[in-house]
Each structure stands twice: as C-alpha cells, then as structure tokens.
Amino acid sequence: MEPPTLVISTVLSAMAYNHPPEKLSVYVSDDGGSEFTFYALLEASRFSKHWIPFCKKFDIEPRAPEAYFSLQYSSLQDSKFAQEWLAIKILIAGRDTSVVDNDGNRLPTLVYMSREKRPKWPHNFKAGAVNALIRVSSEITNAPFILNLDCDMYSNNADTIQEMLCFFMDEKKGDEFAFVQFPQYYNNLTKNDIYANRCLVTAEVIHPGLGGYSAALYCGTGCFHRRDSLCGRKYFRGDRVQWNIESEKNAERTTGDLEESSKVLASCSYEKGTQWGKEVILYLPL
Ligand SMILES: O=c1ccn([C@@H]2O[C@H](COP(=O)(O)OP(=O)(O)O[C@H]3O[C@H](CO)[C@@H](O)[C@H](O)[C@H]3O)[C@@H](O)[C@H]2O)c(=O)[nH]1
Ligand SMILES: [Mn+2]
C-alpha cells in the first residue's frame, strides 16, 4: 500500500491548479480498497476547502501540501475513523454550485474509486487502474482530457493545464496531438547524482528528439491524453476534433445514482466478455 499522505498530496496539488474548477476533476484509483486511503481522501476533501483558497491567495508553489510543508513546521491532527466503505464515492461534486471553499469559490470534483482486485483475476497493475478510471470518469464527468499521475508524484506548476491546452488548441497542429507529456523531476537525489537518477538524457534529449519526429513515447505518467485517443479513436489527416466541452448527459442524475451506476465499471470482471475488454483495454508501457 502506498502511504495515504503521499496520495493526498498528489491529489491536492492537482485540485489546486489555476483552472476553472467546474472543468477540473480529480480521480483516485485505490486497488482493492483501503480504509486508510479512503479516509485520508475524505479528510483531504475537507482540507481542500482551506488549501485551495490558501494556495491561490498566496500564489504558493508547490501545491502538494507535503512538499510545501516540508519547508515549514506543521502539526498533525488526530483523525476520526471512517464510518463507511464505498467502492465509488463522489466526495466533492463540482457541478453543485452550493459546494464552495471558505472564500465562496467553487471546487473541483473529487472522486474516490476503490478498484476491485481478486486472486486469479489479472489486475494489470497501473494499466488496469487507468482502464477502470477511464470508464468511471466517462460515466461521471467525461472531460475530454485526462492527466494521470502516480501516487508519489505532484505537479510543480499550477499553470500546467493552460500550457497543455495551448498544444491541443494549436490551430494548425493541435488536432494531430494525441497526448502532451511533461518531463519528470525527482526529489531526494544524492549530491552529485552519481547514479544518474535525474534521467536527464531521457527527459532532455531522447524525448524532445523523438518528439521532433512526431514519434514521442508515452512514459506512463505525467501526461495529458485526449480521452478519445485512449478510447481507440483513429486519427486521419485533416480530421477535426469535436470537443466534448461539458457533458450535459448527467445533468438530471443524482450523485448517488452516478456512484451506483459506475461501481460495475470498477469491478475486476468488467473487461471479461465486454466490448471494452475485447477492443479497448490498454497495456501501458514501463
Ligand atoms: O497494481 C497497481 C500498480 C500501480 N498502480 C499505480 O501506478 C503507479 C506506478 O506504478 P509503480 O509500480 O509505482 O511503477 P514505478 O516503477 O514506480 O513507475 C514507473 O512505471 C510506471 C508505470 O508505467 C510509470 O507510471 C512511472 O512513470 C515509472 O516511473 C503507482 O504509483 C500507482 O499509482 C496501481 O494503481 N495499481
Ligand atoms: Mn512507483
């Protein structure tokens, strides 16, 4: 199990992006479902109402609380034990205009998903989690772009979403891009990085070079994909992308109804015998 505090730091850094919250959703996949992770996320959803306005007011960076507070003193609070366990829980429904932070501003959607894992069912590691997240998010919010982050990562630039959109919205080439990927940087390197953990050659030579030939490799993380490209859309030259700006299909449905209908999408058996299992299933590199 990954430490829950790492996970919520990742989540909070993504929730604090400078981007209209009603267009931003954060999904967490928790293999097998751990009460600790769920409870940590529940606390994080409450904390986000203080954290996000704080970040925006003081323009702080980085917006992962753990990274930020590692520079400063912070006191731990006792946590209550979670009362219930649920497979899918919409902790913050961003479309609900009455859900606001302490400054009265709307918040991004936050969804907890505990993906089912059972012995004898291949869970496909991260790829299995990403498959389940794509399915569940398409049921609930269905945004056209998807960023995935490992649980031990955080975003170090609050304007990343605008930067990514500049590529996808480029009038000449934007429609040709399936994904926009950012390099990874690491904490805790040794002083002279004698083991070359910085991976400079990969980040600054190989990937930009391949990108120049439109042949960039997807590294498995820190990458914004078009939902369409992950779901098997075939590109042909001159194709114009139809942006699914805001899905209206769920306007009438309650949060409870969305949670209930998306549970089956996170089950370990969903891919067996379905069109998704036959045609879509992704096996990520690395
Ligand atoms: O059964 C699993 C295994 C992994 N994960 C998630 O996937 C992430 C990456 O998996 P991990 O086993 O930690 O891979 P690493 O070897 O640490 O990471 C390398 O491989 C990953 C998978 O391709 C890439 O995302 C990373 O960039 C690359 O550094 C984890 O942090 C989890 O968030 C799951 O949800 N379920
Ligand atoms: Mn890892």
Image (tube, grey):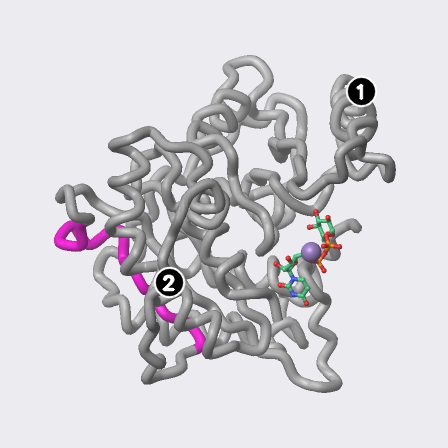
- Image position of 45 with respect to 106: above or below: below
Majority secondary structure of magenta residues: loop
Q: Residue 118 appears at what percent x and percent y?
A: 66, 84
Residue 11 colored in magenta in the image? no
Q: Quadrant of residue 138?
A: bottom left
Q: Residue 208 appears at what percent x and percent y?
A: 75, 22
Which residue is the site of mark 1? Answer: 209
Dot 1 alpha-carbon crowd within 10 angstroms: few under 14, some 14 to 19, many 20 or more: some
The reply to whether the residue tagged 1 has its Cβ within 8 angstroms of ligand 1 is: no
Residue located at (54% from left, 69% from top) = 30
- Which secondary structure lies at badge 1? helix
- Residue positioned most to the right: 195
Ligand 2 resides in the quarter of the picture at bottom right
Q: Residue 179 appears at what percent x and percent y?
A: 62, 34
Q: Which amino acid does label 2 sit on?
A: Leu
Write the start and end of the magenta stretch as one range. Answer: 87-100
> Disc 2 or 1, which lies upstream in sequence?
2
Q: Which amino acid does label 1 sit on?
A: Gly
Residue 92 colored in magenta in the image? yes
Task: Give 217 or 185, whichever is nearer the viewer.
Answer: 185
Residue located at (72% from left, 40% from top) = 189
Q: Residue 62 has which mark?
A: none
Task: Give 23 or 243, whichever is nearer the viewer.
Answer: 23
The reply to whether the residue tagged 2 has its Cβ within 8 angstroms of ligand 1 is: no
Residue located at (30% from left, 47% from top) = 51
Is residue 143 something that shows in the picture? no
Q: Quadrant of residue 270?
A: bottom right
- Residue positioned most to the front: 73
- Which secondary structure lies at badge 2? loop
Q: Residue 76 has which mark?
A: 2
Task: Give 207 or 258, whichever is nearer the viewer.
Answer: 207
- Residue positioned most to the top: 172
